[in-house]
Image (cartoon, helix red, strand yellow):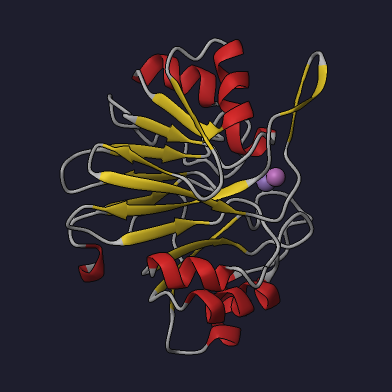
Amino acid sequence: MELLQGTTIFWLGHSTVLVQTPKGTNILIDPFIAQNPKYPRGFQLPEKIHYILLTHGHGDHMSDAVPVAAKHHATVVAVYELAAYMEARGVAKAIGMNLGGTVQLDDVAATMVEAKHSAGAQDEEGTHYVGVAAGFVLSIMNGPVLYHAGDTAVFGDMKLIAGLYHPQVAMLPIGGHFTMGPKEAALAASFLEPQVILPLHFGTFPPLKGTPEELVKLVGPSIHVAKLAPGDSL
Ligand code: NI
Ligand code: MN
């Protein structure tokens, strides 16, 4: 896709996305693999994953962060408390940050932005406070600006994300029930004004009923809604 200027975005089902920059930086967002019914079995992750970005502490966004970080020698980037929780679970390298801040990850400036969602982490010891839910804006050197919204409702301050960073690609949850559905995602698109939407967080489980087809009807022809199968790339 021309607007991506050599960056590749693989959708791996649910909210799991692999971004490969022209310089060769591999960023995995919200790894949900073993328990993800839509993960493309047989998909080969790159040997080296430089960074794993976590939007929040729910299992369907971070349940494979610890094993993938260990196997692929990745640094985990998350909101401060979630980064500390990851370190306590055995992640060797973590960067804690917070809303509004930017960290430079090689050729990618990663900005943590707001999301409207809950964010506890559940394990065998109960539910833990691991900071707030977030999204990420990835500003890729000599490349596009990408926005991964994580899990969220639509909110008016998406206009601030558009005004500050101008993402060309918006990865938005559309399944409903736990996040916005197509109706709300269409309003989000009007705030964000991306050229491309990659729908996330739909169809994985029965309650996530929103579909890309509904979103296409609502946003009209000015925005391209990418209809990928898990494992496919932009
Ligand atoms: Ni969630
Ligand atoms: Mn989720």
Give the answer, above or below, for where 21 lies relative to 59.
Answer: below
Q: What residue sits 23% from the left and 47% below the top?
A: 21
Quadrant of the rendering where the C terminus is positioned: bottom left
Q: What residue sits 68% from the left and 35% below the top?
A: 131
Residue 140: x %, y % from top left: 27, 53
Residue 94: x %, y % from top left: 46, 22
Q: Quadrant of residue 218?
A: bottom right
Q: Nearer the viewer, residue 129 or 206?
A: 129
* Residue 161 seen in render: yes
The single residue placed furthest to the right in the displayed view is: 126
* Residue 63 seen in render: no
- Left or right: 48 with respect to 132? left
Quadrant of the rendering where the N terminus is positioned: bottom left
Give the answer, above or below, for where 180 lies relative to 119.
Answer: below
Q: What residue sits 44% from the left and 12% below the top?
A: 92
Displayed-image quarter of ligand 1: top right
Residue 155: x %, y % from top left: 67, 68
Q: How many marks?
A: 0
The single residue placed furthest to the bottom in the displayed view is: 221
The single residue placed furthest to the front in the displayed view is: 101
Residue 82: x %, y % from top left: 61, 28
- Left or right: 128 with respect to 232? right
- Left or right: 25 with respect to 224? left
